[in-house]
Amino acid sequence: MPTPLDDRRKPCGVARLTNRQLAWRAIGIKSLTKDKIIKQEQQATINTEVLIALVGGVLGWALASFTGIVLLGQKGTLLWNLIIPFCSSIVVSTLLWFGLLGWVRLRKFDRIAQIHLTHGICPSCAYQLDDLTTQDDGCVVCPECNAAWKQSRVRRADETVTHA
Ligand SMILES: [Zn+2]
């Protein structure tokens, strides 16, 4: 696993998703997502997520077909040839996606960090980075988790709205 780093190259966290954000992530339809940060995150990680969903789908289908046809001898039944493998595909790909989401976000941390900073939010802990004093090295330090971010990368949430 790569370690996420702040702008002083010190290890930091990856901002956790709220339950609401996680729900938007799980629905996975970018055009419907109401949360601006999640919408942009989805754009950054879509390829990996589609790949995970496909792998999970194939695995789920294979697992159910193997169980039905090989283990239970249910050859040629609609239930075991279509319905159960289909449901299994969805369940396994969802579980796999859920299990790997942390890794997916970590992998794209540079992009995800910039998305958070553009909204004035600490990429390490999701704290609002407004009105902080810029230090000598051009960084602002998050009062919540001490991660340091270049002031030039941080936009205030209200500025983002004006320029959008
Ligand atoms: Zn922070």
Image: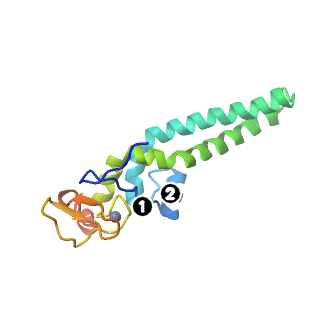
Q: Tell whether label 1 touches label 2 (CB within 8 Å).
A: yes
Residue 164 visible (yes or no):
no
- Where, quadrant-wise, is the N terminus in this rendering? top left
Three-letter code for the amino acid on which mark 1 is drawn: Asp
- Where, quadrant-wise, is the C terminus in this rendering? bottom left
Q: Single out the residue that lies furthest toward the bottom.
A: 131
97 over 74 or under it: above or below? below
Q: Badge 2 is on which residue? A: 24
Three-letter code for the amino acid on which mark 2 is drawn: Trp
Along the line of sight, the residue nearer the viewer: 113 or 25:
113
Q: Position of residue 89 (x, y in %)?
A: 66, 39
Q: Is the CB–ligand 1 distance for label 2 below 8 Å? A: no
Return the disc, 2 or 1, that comes first in the chain's sequence.
2
Q: Badge 1 is on which residue? A: 35
Q: Position of residue 107 (x, y in %)?
A: 40, 43
Residue 101 visible (yes or no):
yes
Q: Single out the residue that lies furthest toward the front.
A: 10
Q: Please report the residue visible at 58 percent of the width from the left and 34 percent of the height from the top.
A: 55
Q: Please report the residue visible at 22 percent of the width from the left and 60 percent of the height from the top.
A: 163
Q: Please report the residue visible at 14 percent of the width from the left and 59 percent of the height from the top.
A: 137
Instruction: Look at the numbered disc 1 and give the secondary structure of its residue.
Output: loop
Q: Please report the residue visible at 32 percent of the width from the left and 51 percent of the height from the top.
A: 5
Pointer 1: residues within 10 angstroms few (<14), some, or many (20+)? Answer: some
| Lateral position of residue 113 relative to residue 155, left or right | right
Instruction: Look at the numbered disc 2 and give the secondary structure of its residue.
Output: helix
Q: CA distance from mark 2 to mark 1?
A: 8 Å
